[in-house]
Image: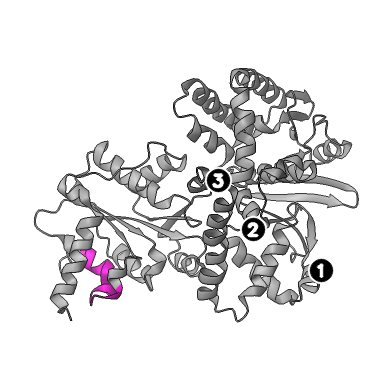
Amino acid sequence: MPSDGELFNLFEQALQAYNPWWHGVSRDTPSFRRPLFEELLQDAAELRQIISLTGPRRVGKTTLVLQVIQHLIGNKGVSPSRIVYYSLDDPILARIPEGPRAIDAIVERFFDLRTRKPREGVQAPIYVFLDEIQRFDRWELHLKKYYDLELPIRWLVTGSASSPIFKKSRESLLGRIKDHHLLPFSFREYVLFRTQDQRALQEIVASGTRIREDVFRSSSGRRLAGSAAEFQRALIPHRDFLQNAFPKFLVCGGFPEVWDLPDAIRRQEYLFDNQVQKVIFEDLFYATQFRKPENIRRFYLYLITRPGEEIRIDAVASEIGASRVMLERYLPLLEMTDLVKTIQKFTRKPLKVKRSNLKAYLVDLGIRNAVMKLDERLLQDDGLLGKYAENLVFRTALAWREQLELSYYRDREKEVDFVATLAADRFLPIEVKYTTQPRAPGYLREFTEHLQQDLALAIGRNVEPEWHDPIVDLGLLEFLLIFG
C-alpha cells in the first residue's frame, strides 16, 4: 500500500498534468469562442468576486475555462506560474490524505497562511480555476474563508446546473460570487460555428447585434423593420446554407458533440444518457434522495410532450398519479437542471400569486428529439414545426439580459405567446405563427396598445419584415439571427 507521502506525490503529479503551461506547453482549445467568453475573461481578470460558470453537462464549460486561461497567458501577459487549473472530479482525490483539503493544498502552494503573504518568488494575484466544484464537499466554506482573508486570488469555478447542491452552496456565498450561465448553442451560435471560414456571412450575422441593441434602446418599430429588411437582403446569397442549416439544428439541437455523430440513433443515445438519465437518476437522486425518481421522470416526460401548451399543475398531478405538493417541489428542481423551463401568466402586479397555470418549454430541442425518438421525419410535421418555432423564440428571449421576466398572456380565447418585461412599465409582446402569412391576430395589437407600448413582434415563416404600427413582422430566421 503506498505511503501518505507517495499518495500526496500523486496529487502533485496530477496538478502538473492539468497545468502543462507551467512547462511551456499549451493545451489545445477550439478557435471558436462563444459570446460569453469576453465577459468571463473580463470578470476573471478584474473582479475580486468569485466567478462561477454553470450549465448543463457537456455544454462546453471546461472548454470556455481553458480558452480564458490560454488568453490570459498568450494575450494578457499573465505568467503561467500564476495560473492553476484542477478538476475536482479527479479520482485521485478519493485516494490521498490531502483529498478532503485539496483546495487548501492548492492555496498553500502560493501563500504562507500564517502571514497571508505570497511565498518567495510568487507574484500575485494568483488565478485558480476549479472545475466540477460541486464534487468537493462544502467547497463554499473553503472559498469563503480565503475570500474573507482577502488573499490576492482570482477564483473561477465551474459546476453542473443539474446539481441543486451547487445552487445551495452558491446562495451561501451571496455577495461574494458572480454567476455566469452557459446554455446549449443557439441557432445564431450554430451558424457562426459552422461558417468560421465564411467571413461575409459572419459579418452579416454580427451586424444583427447592433440591430438588437437599437431595439432594446429605442423600441422603434419603423427602424427595426427597415434594418431587418436590409439584414434579410444581405442574407440572400447565403439563403441556401441557412435553409439547410436550420432543419439540421432543429433535429440535432445545441450540443456540439452530437453534430457530427453519424446517425440519429447515436445522437439520441448520447443525449438521453448524458442529459436525461444521468441528470434525473444520478444528479437529482443524489441531491434530494427521492424515494421514487421515476415520478420526476414521468413529470418531465409529461412536460416535454406539451411544449408551449398551457397546463395546470393539479391536472398534471391527477394524470400522472402524483400529488400537487410533490410536483410543485419537483418543478424548481427540473428547471434548475436546464432540462425544461416554465413561464407563468403575465401580470403587472409586483407580487406573483401562487403558480397554478403555466407553460413549459425546452432549453434544447435536441434533447426532446432524443427522448421522443424523433429524427429528420419531424420536419414533415407542420404542427410540430410550429411548436418548435415557438420554442426557439422562447429560448432566444430566455437569454436576453435586457428582460427581467418572460411570461405569456391568456384570457379565454385571447392569447399572446410571450411578454418580455424590460422595465417597470416597458414590455415587448411577441406572437409566433409559423406560417407564410404572419400577420398577427388582432389581439396582439389590442394587447400592445392596452399596455401603451410602441413595439410588438409577430414572428412568421419566410416573411418580409414590415411595420404595421406598433407591430413588426419578422421571419423566424431573421429573428433568431438578430436577437439570438
User: Is residue 138 on the magenta stretch?
Assistant: no
- The answer to which image quadrant residue 173 occupies is bottom left
Q: Which one is nearer the viewer's eye here, 416 or 65?
A: 65
Q: CA distance from mark 2 to mark 1?
A: 23 Å
Instruction: Assign the C terminus to one quadrant of the image.
Output: top right
Task: Identify the disc placed on residue 315.
Answer: 1
| Residue 427 shows up from this direction | no
User: Is residue 99 on the magenta stretch?
Assistant: yes
What's under tag 1, amino acid-wise?
Ala
Instruction: Assign the N terminus to one quadrant of the image.
Output: bottom left
Q: Which one is nearer the viewer's eye here, 454 or 53?
A: 53
What's under tag 2, amino acid-wise?
Val
Q: In the rendered image of this protein, does residue 265 appear above or below residue 38?
A: below
- Which element carries disc 3, helix, strand or loop? loop
- Magenta span of residues: 94-107
Residue at the extreme left: 120
Q: In the rendered image of this protein, does residue 106 appear above or below residue 427?
A: below
Q: Which residue is mark 2?
A: 371
In this rendering, which labeled residue sits more in front, label 3 or label 2?
Answer: 2
Q: Measured from the top left, where is residue 367 in percent x and y? A: 60, 54
